[in-house]
């Protein structure tokens, strides 16, 4: 149930514009235990932060007031819209370090309980303005919003296109599959590198192999993923990478010679034909020995080239 507060001379309202949302708020100082965290806020990163605790102590308290709303279910309690980490670390100072002076919390309180969409819009607007997105947070928030309000509303709240939203969701979903990294915090970096590969080349088989190799720590540098841009375009190198004992280094060794500057017209086409044939190792060609279809095509091409040479030699 949404609650509203009444303006009094002791607490005059002030208007605050946060993106599309205009709030009426007033300033006050509350006890730590009058404040209740919002379990449905988008930020899911760890809340305890020794550095933030040191900052609170250095400032002799919280410098930036928490943004709160009247709690819809508990009278005389206020729910956090923004400031959960500041509140959580003040609580650590009070309960763990026994520093009672940090129980008094500066707050900016709205005149009413916000709707869920208003709360999300306000929270995201504040964090975008602060440029406070942590490594994985933007993707995580996008993923969470899609599950909560759907793609169209999520894109609208984040102020991005549905296409950009889908990209963020794909990256987050992929990062969750990278489960055995030396530093789990780098999973989003790995996922972004993988996501930047050409979608047409990143087939389900390639993606599954890549995830398995990363989780098995056979690939230990996220920048090595960029080498797959060349490997996956080369059929021989790609097949080598997909074998059970394949690796990026082995696949690179199977790459054909770099393309030379091709001539125009017929000359360029002849050069391209030669390069295409040279890309295949002799072990692969040997396996085609006696293949009637291949031999027929070779004879046909050989005759065509002989006739072409004869014509151009006259």
Image (tube, rainbow, N blue to C red):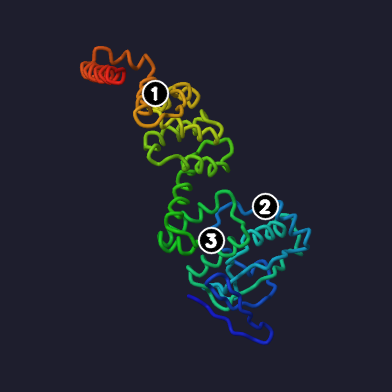
> Foreground residue, 213 or 43?
213
Which circle, 3 or 1, is nearer the viewer? 1
- Mark 2 or mark 1: name the one nearer the start of the chain: 2
Q: Quadrant of residue 81?
A: bottom right
> Foreground residue, 39 or 213?
213
Q: In the rendered structure, find residue 49 and report the number of the disc placed on it.
A: 2
Q: CA distance from mark 2 to mark 1?
A: 58 Å
Residue most extreme to the bottom: 9
- Mark 3 or mark 2: name the one nearer the start of the chain: 3
- Mark 3 or mark 1: name the one nearer the start of the chain: 3
> For numbered disc 3, what is the local secondary structure?
loop
> For numbered disc 2, what is the local secondary structure?
loop
Q: Is residue 189 above or below residue 312?
A: below
Residue most extreme to the front: 314
Q: In the rendered structure, find residue 275 and report the number of the disc placed on it.
A: 1
Measuring from the top left, give residue 202's x and y in whole percent.
40, 38
Which circle, 2 or 1, is nearer the viewer? 1
Quadrant containing the C terminus in the rendered view = top left
Measuring from the top left, give residue 190's x and y in whole percent.
52, 40
Q: How many marks?
A: 3
Q: Is residue 194 above or below residue 126?
A: above
Which residue lies at the image location 58% right of the left edge and 68% below the top edge?
79
Q: Which residue is mark 3?
A: 41
> Foreground residue, 202 or 49?
202
Q: CA distance from mark 3 to mark 1?
A: 57 Å
Measuring from the top left, give residue 25's x and y in whole percent.
62, 77
How many residues crowd mark 3 within 10 Å: few (<14), some (14–19), many (20+)?
A: some
Q: Is residue 289 above or below residue 243?
A: above
281 relative to 69 in the view: left or right: left
Q: In the rendered structure, find residue 19 and report the number of the disc placed on it.
A: none
């Amino acid at each position: 149930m949404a609650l509203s507060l009444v303006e009094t001379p002791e607490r005059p309202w002030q208007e605050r514009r946060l993106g599309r949302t205009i709030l009426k708020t007033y300033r006050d100082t509350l006890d730590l235990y009058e404040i209740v965290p919002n379990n449905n806020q988008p930020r899911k990163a760890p809340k305890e932060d020794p550095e933030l605790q040191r900052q609170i102590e250095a400032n002799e308290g919280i410098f930036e007031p928490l943004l709160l709303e009247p709690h819809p279910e508990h009278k005389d309690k206020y729910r956090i819209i923004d400031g959960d980490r500041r509140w959580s670390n003040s609580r650590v100072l009070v309960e763990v370090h026994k520093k009672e002076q940090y129980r008094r919390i500066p707050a900016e309180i709205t005149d009413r309980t916000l709707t869920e969409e208003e709360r999300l819009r306000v929270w995201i607007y504040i964090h975008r303005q602060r440029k406070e997105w942590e490594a994985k947070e933007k993707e995580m928030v996008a993923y969470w919003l899609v599950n909560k309000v759907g793609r169209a509303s999520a894109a609208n709240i984040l102020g991005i296109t549905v296409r950009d939203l889908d990209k963020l969701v794909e990256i987050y979903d992929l990062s969750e599959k990278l489960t055995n990294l030396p530093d789990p915090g780098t999973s989003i970096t790995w996922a972004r590198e993988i996501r930047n590969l050409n979608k047409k080349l990143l087939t389900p088989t390639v993606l599954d192999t890549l995830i398995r190799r990363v989780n098995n720590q056979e690939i230990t540098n996220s920048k090595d993923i960029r080498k797959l841009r060349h490997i996956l375009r080369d059929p021989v190198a790609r097949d080598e990478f997909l074998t059970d004992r394949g690796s990026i280094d082995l696949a690179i060794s199977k790459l054909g010679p770099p393309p030379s500057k091709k001539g125009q017209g017929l000359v360029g086409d002849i050069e391209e034909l030669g390069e295409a044939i040279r890309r295949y190792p002799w072990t692969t060609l040997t396996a085609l020995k006696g293949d009637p279809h291949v031999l027929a095509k070779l004879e046909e091409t050989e005759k065509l080239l002989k006739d072409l040479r004869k014509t151009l030699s006259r």
